Amino acid sequence: MKQNNIQRNFMKTIGITGGIGAGKSTVLDYIKDNYNAHIIIADILAYELESPGGICYDSIVELLGSEILKDDGYIDKKRMASGIFKDPELLKQVNGIIHPAVKEHILSTISRERSAGRYDYLIVEAALLIEEGYESILDELWYVRTDPEIRRKRLKVSRGYSDEKIDSIFSSQLSDTEYAAKCKVIIDNSGNPEEAFKQIDNALSPQT
């Protein structure tokens, strides 16, 4: 575990974002293994809030109907996606249920962990940090940047995506310029992992 000079009563909050296939998980794993950090992955948190007993579950089922449920009572993500992505208004309503709940949970966790003083860093990873205005609630945002062709190759190998699907996803996400304009730190993950790790260490080194 890397040491730093952060005072125990101060926990820095960092949002990590970037396009699909940029390697955000590589950055998160390195921070988790080498720093005293609490990691929140927005997609996992959203899944928990949408699960039976979660605060979003009843509202989503009421909005979309019980046909989106699997036999075990959990929401079938594919069924839900096939319905809402064809209907912009329905997608807006579902996002209006999920995104505020995720943000409220993150704010509550930040408050709790700052009071507890257990961590030097709290890291939030999400694709829509900029779009959802997280720059106003986190200390700083980081952008994990990777050359588009490297991202494309990763997505073909790891997920079996076609070029058409990748093009569609890329076109729906922010550009390098838009990410860079909002993020204090840019981690270039186009090379080998060790090069990205050095950038992370530099970004997390105490400022003198």
Image (spheres, helix red, strand yellow):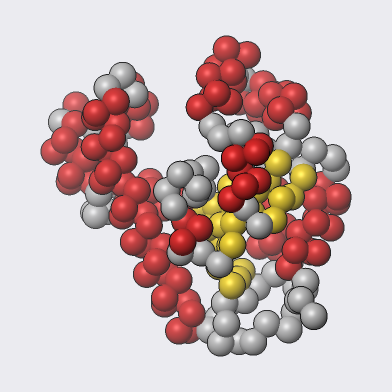
**127 on left or right of 196:** left
Q: Position of residue 78 (x, y in %)?
A: 36, 26
Quarter of the image for the C terminus: give it.
Answer: bottom right
**68 on left or right of 37:** left
The quarter of the picture where residue 59 lies is top left
For the question of whether residue 40 can be seen, the reply is: no
Quarter of the image for the N terminus: give it.
Answer: bottom right
The one nearer the camera, 186 or 36, is 186
The quarter of the picture where residue 13 lies is bottom right
As drawn, 9 above or below 188: below
As drawn, 104 above or below 167: below
The one nearer the camera, 159 or 200, is 200
For the question of whether residue 155 can be seen, the reply is: yes
Q: Residue at x 47, y 56 (%)?
A: 134
**103 on left or right of 63:** right
Q: Position of residue 42 (x, y in %)?
A: 46, 50
As drawn, 31 above or below 74: below
Q: Residue at x 42, y 76 (%)?
A: 111
